[in-house]
Image (tube, rainbow, N blue to C red):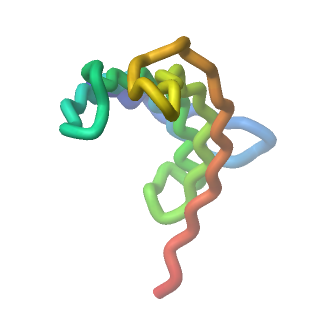
Amino acid sequence: QFGYAFKETTIANQPVVIQPNIAIQSSNFDALENTMNVYDFTINFLLNSSHSNKLSIGYQNRPIFDDQTKKQKEYKGMAVIQYQISLK
């Protein structure tokens, strides 16, 4: 996993830190014939320049396995949108 937080900027008169990141997960499960590799690209928007108020928009490319042969058939993409707020 690798990410970089850019300097604080202003969007709609609010302080925001933009933090893109990429991640690769490789898993070897006994039940599957192939290694499972998942690729992620995400952009975090740290609202008020804090992890306590964060919007994340990302894309995952993940393998699809055949339920009978347990072999990888293809890759499919998935859009991910998350909002995180910290309650104190």
Front one among 49 and 68: 68
Q: Residue 3 occupies which quadrant of the picture? A: top left
Lateral position of residue 33 relative to residue 75, left or right: left
| Residue extending furthest toward the bottom | 88
Q: Position of residue 15 (x, y in %)?
A: 61, 45
Q: Position of residue 10 (x, y in %)?
A: 66, 36
| Above or below: residue 76 compared with residue 81 | above
| Residue extending furthest toward the right | 12
Front one among 6 and 37: 37
| Above or below: residue 84 compared with residue 39 | below
Q: Residue 72 occupies which quadrant of the picture? A: top left
| Residue extending furthest toward the front | 68
| Above or below: residue 4 compared with residue 17 | above
Lateral position of residue 59 relative to residue 3, left or right: right
| Above or below: residue 15 compared with residue 65 | below
Q: Position of residue 50 (x, y in %)?
A: 46, 56
Front one among 34 and 88: 34
Identify the residue at horizontal 76%, vertical 44% (top origin): 13
Screen quadrant of the N terminus: top left
Numbered disc total: 0
Identify the residue at horizontal 22%, vertical 37% (top origin): 29
Q: Position of residue 55 (x, y in %)?
A: 62, 48
The answer to whether any part of residue 48 appears in the image is yes
Identify the residue at horizontal 57%, vertical 62% (top origin): 84
The answer to whether any part of residue 20 appears in the image is no
Identify the residue at horizontal 53%, vertical 47% (top origin): 46
Front one among 69 and 58: 69
